[in-house]
Every structure is written in C-alpha cells, then in structure tokens.
Image (spheres, helix red, strand yellow):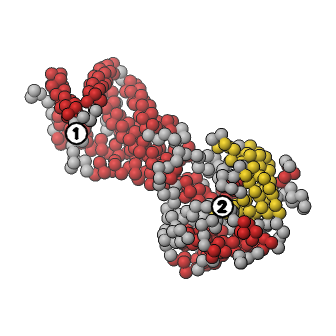
Amino acid sequence: MSTAVPTWAGVAASLALVAVAVAVAWRQRLHLAREITIAAARAGAQLAAVGAILLLVFQHAGPAGAAGWLTVMVLIAGQVAARRARGLPRAMPVATAAVAVGTAATAGTLLALGVISTQPRVVIPVGGMIVSGAMVATAVTLTRVLEEAAAARPAIEARLSLGMPASQAFAPHLHAALRTALVPSIDSTKTVGLISLPGAMTGLILAGVSPLTAIRYQIVVMYMLLAAAALAALAAARLAERTLFDDAHRLRPLPAPAGKDSGRHPARPA
Amino acid sequence: MTGAAAADQAGGAPALFALEGVTVRRGGAALLDHVTCEIPAGACTVVTGPSGAGKTTLLRLLNRLDERDSGRVLLLGRPLPDLDVLALRRRVALVAQAQVLLTDRVLDELRAGQPRLGDDEAAGLLEQVSLPSAMLARGTAGLSGGEAQRLCLARALAARPQVLLLDEPTSALDPASTSAVEQAARAFIATGGSVVLISHDPDQTRRIAGRVLTLHSGQLTATRHVPAAASLREVP
C-alpha cells in the first residue's frame, strides 16, 4: 500500500476504523452503533454513486453537463439552507437565490478570467466547493436574520414609527446578522495552513503534486470561498429583508424569539 | 355609520380618525371586531378596556404598524392606504409601551428620526418632557424607566408630528414621571396637536380625556365625551 491513492482493498481495510468507532459507541452504551454503521454505509454508497456519475459526466458531458450538475447542487443547497430558517417567509426561494448568486458570481468570475478550465472535471469539484461555502453562509445568515428580526421587533418598530423605511429600520440588525455569518469564513481564511492543511491542497499533495503548486490552487480556493460566502450572505440578507417586511414597511408576524432582549438599552424600572 | 363616520356631526369637518367597521383577525381570533368610531382632532382620546381588548391593535392601525382585515380607517377623511406610509408615521407618531432606546447617547436618541436636529431644539424637546437639558450629553444606558419613557416621547416629538399615539405611557412610572408625561400631552394639544392614549388608570382618564373609547373583547362597548373643563385638570 505504498501508492499515493488507496486501492479498493485499502478502502475495505479502512472499514476497520468504522469498526473502532462502533466498538467505542457500543462499549460506552451511546446507542450510536447503529447510526454510525448506517452513516458509514451511506457515505460509501453515496460516494460510489457520485463517483460513477461523475465518471459518466466527465467522459460524455461537456460544459452543459457541468452547468446542469451545478444547477442541481444549487437547488439541493437552497433546500438545505432554507430548512435552517423555518419561519422565514418564502425561505426556499430566498435561500436558493442566495446560493445561486454566490455561486454564479464566483464561478463565473473564475471562468471568465480563465483561472479555471471549463472542463467538467474542473468545474464540478470547484463548483461543489463554492456551492457548499455559499450554502453554509446562506443558512447562517438566514437563521441570524430571522432571530434578529423576531427578537428586535420592538426596536425595529420604534424606528418604523419614526418614519424610517424598512431597510433603514432593519439596517443595524442586518449588519449584525451578516457579521455573524461571515466571521467563520474570515477566520478560516486567516488561519489557513496554520491549523490544518485545507482539502484541495491536501488532495493535490496526496496525489503527488508539489506543495508549491498545490498552494496556488489552495489560494484560489480560499479567495473564491470568501467571495462566495460574502456574496451569498449579502444576497440572502437583502432577499430575506424583502420578505420580512410588507409594502407598507411593516414587519410581518414571525416565530417567537428564544428569550433575547428586545431593545438595545433596557431602562431600569422606575 | 359608514361614510358619514368620517364627518364630525357638529361641524361637518372630517374627524381626525374615523374607523368604519374595522376588523382585525390574527390566527382565527378577532382582535378588533367591526369597530366603528371617531377620534376628534385637538383633544386627548383615551382608549380603555381590559387586557386583550384590542387597544394596542387599534392604536397600531392608526399609523399602519398593523393592518385591518376589513373595514376602513380614515385620516381627515382620506383612507390611510392612500397616504404615503412613511409620511403618515412622521405625522402620526407612536410611542410604544416598551421603552426601547436606539442609541448610546441622549442627543443621538433625539436625532434618531430627525438627524438635523440642533442642540437648542434638542434641549427644548427635553424641557417639553420635564427632563433637564444637561441630560443631552448623557449616555442612554442606566436611565430610569421614567426618564427612558420621557426620552421616547421627546424622540417622537422631534419629528413635529400632528398626532401622538401613546400606548400606556405611564403604566410603570412614578407619580412625578406620570405628571410630566401628562403635562407634555396637554402642552402638545394646546399647540394644536391631538393625542390618542391607552390607559388602565381611571384617575388618569378623568384628568386628561376629552373622549373615552372603551373596548371589550375587540368590540367597542362605549364612547363617552368628556366636557373640556374636566380634561384640563392637573395631577393633584
């Protein structure tokens, strides 16, 4: 087993690691042994299926096939992100549009500048990373926007009562939600290479590529993930804001917040 | 009373606000149920009734923070949806029951809805609510409930509204703060403004009301006109 890429026998041998996890769960009576086994089986089956489909797409489909693949990923990602923001009006179209904006702008720029090739074997994995980053940023943004709107209703309505338009009345809360959503992307960009070697770079190094070549790819990946997260979060926040307020600049009814302060400075009792 | 509800029967001039068969439903329950009434200009109209009667909903309809499901709400004879909603909210200022301060400094708070407010005007606003002008330089954190409520009232007055909607403005205040808020409301009316105030306090209603609307389970159960002399009484 000295080859750079594991053989199928090697993959089978790695099942021993799943057995270790199952053994730990069983001995500690965590009632997770069955769930770990199912998760491992699902991961193997899903990746085998995806690998087979990718092989077909790489061999037979051109850029149109890659675009179709990306579209399906965006739709799935939109669905997943929307589930995090239950209670937000029209969460599904908002989340899907936000992921699509982040993905289209980032992947489009990389393709237009010729940074990455239009071949499916490049567009699909790179696009997958972009969609994934956009999905996480969208989910966090929508969750935070919803929580902010529900918890800060008195402050928002106080601003609306002063004659402010909805966008101005909600601005401080929108900014807070965006900051929360983007901090993980900024932190992982700051610490890349120091804490762990990131996925794309690890993959290239494992495949035998020189580390100096691998970092070029990784730098592009980090920049594109930052852009995808920022653009998706911004789009999600703006679109969510439109669904939270009606035409008369009224905050729509929302699920009750989970015990947060409603105003910035609650006064002492009289 | 339908279209005629908009016209004051005495003089033919339209009422400040007219509600015509207004119903508001939320989650299957009627918060307001076919309410028809008038709110006169140049007076303090007190809305009273038990908790859950629909008082706050009625108040929030008047600056369109809430919307009716049926019926009409008119301001000086014009249906509210025909008016620009942002201009309406500057004209009809609402001070909510919750004392929510939006900034870190008292002066910034007064400028929240009126960014070009000068220092002298800001000091004048504090005086209107019986707060010392020296307070302008203070932070908003740590204000007492009475001070915060009066600052919220001054913040609303900064936009020079024609109507003040006050949702239980004194329910948690000490007598001195209550007196200051009532005095500010009286002064506002004396300069041509109108006030709609929610109150649970019969004494306050006697002191300040020109008209009393009583709600019960979303229905208007009584409308009472109070002689002008009675509505000018000061806090004893």
Q: Indicate the position of residue A46 as horizontal and vertical percent values.
A: 31, 25
Query: Between B81 and A41, which is closer to the camera in this rendering?
Result: A41
Whether labels 1 and 2 belong to a single chain: the reply is: no
Q: Which residue is mark 2?
A: B167
Q: Amino acid at mark 1?
A: Met
Instruction: Name above or below for residue A140 compared with residue B215.
Output: above
Query: Between A211 and B162, which is closer to the camera in this rendering?
Result: B162
Q: Chain for mark 1?
A: A
Looking at the image, is mark 1 or mark 2 nearer the viewer?
Answer: 2
Instruction: Name above or below for residue A110 compared with residue A265.
Output: above
Tag 2 secondary structure: strand
Q: Is residue A25 left or right of residue B70?
A: left
The residue furthest left is A2
Residue B82, can we see it? no
Tag 1 secondary structure: helix
Query: Between A154 and B213, which is closer to the camera in this rendering?
Result: B213
Q: Is residue B109 left or right of residue A179?
A: right
Residue A38, can we see it? yes
Q: Which residue is mark 1?
A: A201
Within 10 angstroms of label 2, few (less than 14), some, or many (20 or more) residues? many
**Residue sitting at 32 percent across and 35 percent down?**
A126
Give the CA distance from mark 1 to mark 2: 61 Å
Q: Chain for mark 2?
A: B
Within 10 angstroms of label 1, few (less than 14), some, or many (20 or more) residues? many
